[in-house]
Image: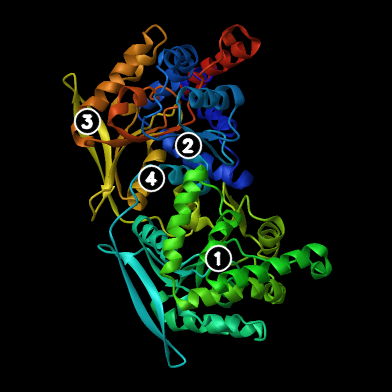
């Protein structure tokens, strides 16, 4: 059915189908806008696109399961593989296929694209950013950066601020990072800022415990005193931060009110794991007394600088990433960082726990309701964090900050800086949503020779820098014209500093998807194009398969050359004997009709 519909090239039949394979991002208005963009793309699509639309649906139904079942079990010592599956995709066609691939590909990660049916390229920036963040995990972390300490004057006193910026390019945004999350030494935060500067092409101004006066966190001081001291440091930086900047608050609460104080200057804010925004009358409860005592004890333990007491606490506020061996490794790294930490770090550790308990709720409740027309705010909450101290706080902030997004950091207790690259990458992807999308790129069409025939391949690369990796993108996902995929590749090249080689329907021979041809014929044609590119792709490259199945086996064919693979929404890896079922006959008919309509 799908083949028939697309085979007809009848827009009156094709456009209503969009809601079948695209999540209704932006509601009815957003869907109508996407329909218009999609129709414009269809009207300029190539004859090979229409041929692909006409033939691929039924070919996928009849041929893909045989291809998948012929593949060997993926060796465990292979490069990393991420399987990206739309969370609203059709169960039999997409979700079960991705689950079977996950079983076949030992060691792969199965990740879900939220609020996506399966045509992720059409579903708006939030879905595209999720796919981008998965690719981000597979490529080296960006360009070289410069790191320096700049002194700013606050009330006649010099305060140190860390500045991290790309070496060779002008940054796309300024980021103000507030980084005194109680027990995390600055030396464990700085590498993350360097990663962000290098991958997101941003200039970061980092305020640590050494930039402020932690003695103002004494319980006999007014809560406003520490706030004003912090705000004075930020105000001293405003001429450097420009007209607009992004705020990242990783202070566990004492810096969160800066979002309100500097709201008119913000282009966005990321607030991570604020603490102890308590419910009314909570302080009279038994639970409150336990938390109050715990905070005082933590302050005393860190105030003693007794490593024998401090290091066992790590498991209380860090997810056991890497199991017992990983925790031990982190403990050693943490101890080394503690031994070089400044006196102000220890003062912050000693005073902040009880200050947070006694002062933060009063600060939060004094803040006005966040205006709806404010810049975007992302609230990042560790999914394994303590309910009362962290999770409920972030939920109350979400209620207070109208229009904010509440996002969860998976497999994280709350000290996300200590919990390994997967957790850090989640935080990075949230910041990525708040900054402009990278550096300028060049896009060109390069002809490669396959059996004496010229085949076009799109090449997208950063204009001014050498790429950190080559990416091979297989992009003929049935009904998505190349013109709607190319902007995503340009975004990836500009933000991840990668060179992308894009194979579209115009690079291959879609007529080989005819049902009277052997399944291997199309595969070999595709592999021949990739083989022609191997000298350009270098010793290792990242594969992105967005073909809905016909290109997936390339991961096996070129496994020895891969540094990683991202496979998105493969289709129709069917269960044994499924073809005899009534559901199979319905899907078979649907695929044929779609082919006719698009054809």
What residue appears at the point 60 percent right and 73 percent down from the top-left corner? 352
Of marks 4 and 2, which one's residue comes earlier in the chain?
2
Q: Residue 487 carries which label?
A: 4
Of marks 1 and 2, which one's residue comes earlier in the chain?
2
Q: Residue 39 carries which label?
A: 2
Q: Residue 546 at x, y = what percent?
A: 42, 32
Left or right of residue 241: residue 414: right
Tag 4–tag 2 contact (CB < 8 Å): no
Of marks 3 and 4, which one's residue comes earlier in the chain?
4
Task: Decide which of 477, 74 is in the foreground and name it.
Answer: 74
How far is the residue under mark 2 from the one under mark 3? 35 Å
User: Which mark's residue is nearer the viewer, 3 or 1?
Assistant: 3
Task: Decide which of 263, 216 is in the foreground and name it.
Answer: 216
Left or right of residue 22: residue 470: left
Farthest residue toward the left? 452
**Residue bearing the label numbered 3:** 534
Q: Residue 56 carries which label?
A: none
**Residue bearing the label numbered 1:** 375
Q: How crowded is mark 1: few (under 14 residues within 10 Å), some or many (20 or more)?
A: some
Q: Quadrant of residue 314?
A: bottom right
Residue 339 appears in the picture as rendered:
yes
Of marks 1 and 4, which one's residue comes earlier in the chain?
1
């Amino acid at each position: 059915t799908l083949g028939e519909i697309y085979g007809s090239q009848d827009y009156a039949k094709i456009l209503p189908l969009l809601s079948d394979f695209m999540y209704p991002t932006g509601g009815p208005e957003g869907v109508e806008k996407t329909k218009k963009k999609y129709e414009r793309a269809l009207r300029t699509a190539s004859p090979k696109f229409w041929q692909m639309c006409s033939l691929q649906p039924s070919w996928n139904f009849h041929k893909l399961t045989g291809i998948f079942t012929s593949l060997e079990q993926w060796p465990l010592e292979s490069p990393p593989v991420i399987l990206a599956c739309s969370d609203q995709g059709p169960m039999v066609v997409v979700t079960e296929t991705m689950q079977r691939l996950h079983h076949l590909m030992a060691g792969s990660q199965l990740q879900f694209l939220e609020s996506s049916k399966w045509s992720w390229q059409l579903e708006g920036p939030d879905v595209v950013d999720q796919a981008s963040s998965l690719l981000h995990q597979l490529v080296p972390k960006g360009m070289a950066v410069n790191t320096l300490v700049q002194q700013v004057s606050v009330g006649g006193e010099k305060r140190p601020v860390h500045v991290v910026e790309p070496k060779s390019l002008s940054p796309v945004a300024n980021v103000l990072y507030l980084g005194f999350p109680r027990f995390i030494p600055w030396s464990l935060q700085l590498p993350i800022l360097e990663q962000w500067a290098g991958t997101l092409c941003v200039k970061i101004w980092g305020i640590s415990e050494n930039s402020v006066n932690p003695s103002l966190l004494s319980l006999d001081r007014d809560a406003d005193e520490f706030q004003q001291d912090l705000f004075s440091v930020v105000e001293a930086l405003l001429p450097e931060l420009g007209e607009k900047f992004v705020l990242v608050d990783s202070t566990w609460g004492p810096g969160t009110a800066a979002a309100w104080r500097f709201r008119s200057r913000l282009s966005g804010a990321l607030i991570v794991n604020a603490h102890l925004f308590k419910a009314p009358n909570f302080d009279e409860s038994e639970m409150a007394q336990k938390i109050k005592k715990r905070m005082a004890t933590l302050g005393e333990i860190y105030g003693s600088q007794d490593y024998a007491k401090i290091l066992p606490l790590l498991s209380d506020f860090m997810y056991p990433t890497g199991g017992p061996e990983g925790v031990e490794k982190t403990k050693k790294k943490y101890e080394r960082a503690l031994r070089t930490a400044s006196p102000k770090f220890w003062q912050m550790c000693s005073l902040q726990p009880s200050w947070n308990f006694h002062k933060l709720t009063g600060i939060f409740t004094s803040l006005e309701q966040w205006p709806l027309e404010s810049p975007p705010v992302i609230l990042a909450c560790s999914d394994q964090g303590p309910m009362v101290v962290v999770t409920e706080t972030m939920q109350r902030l979400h209620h207070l900050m109208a229009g904010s997004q509440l996002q969860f950091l998976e497999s994280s207790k709350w000290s996300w800086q200590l919990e390994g690259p997967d957790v850090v990458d989640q935080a990075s992807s949230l910041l990525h949503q708040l900054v402009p999308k990278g550096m300028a790129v060049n896009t060109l069409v390069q002809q490669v020779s396959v059996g004496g025939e010229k085949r076009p391949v799109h090449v997208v690369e950063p204009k001014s820098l050498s790429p950190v990796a080559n990416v091979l993108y297989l992009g003929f996902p049935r009904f998505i014209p190349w013109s709607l995929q190319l902007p995503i590749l340009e975004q990836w090249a500009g933000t991840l500093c990668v060179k992308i080689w894009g194979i579209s329907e115009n690079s291959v021979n879609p007529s080989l998807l005819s049902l009277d041809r052997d399944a291997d014929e199309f595969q070999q044609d595709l592999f021949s194009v990739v083989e022609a590119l191997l000298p350009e792709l270098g010793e290792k490259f990242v594969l992105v398969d967005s073909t809905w199945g016909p290109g997936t086996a390339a991961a096996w064919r070129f496994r020895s050359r891969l540094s990683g693979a991202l496979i998105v929404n493969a289709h129709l890896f069917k269960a044994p004997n499924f073809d005899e079922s009534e559901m199979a006959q319905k899907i078979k008919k649907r695929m044929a009709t779609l082919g006719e309509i698009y054809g």
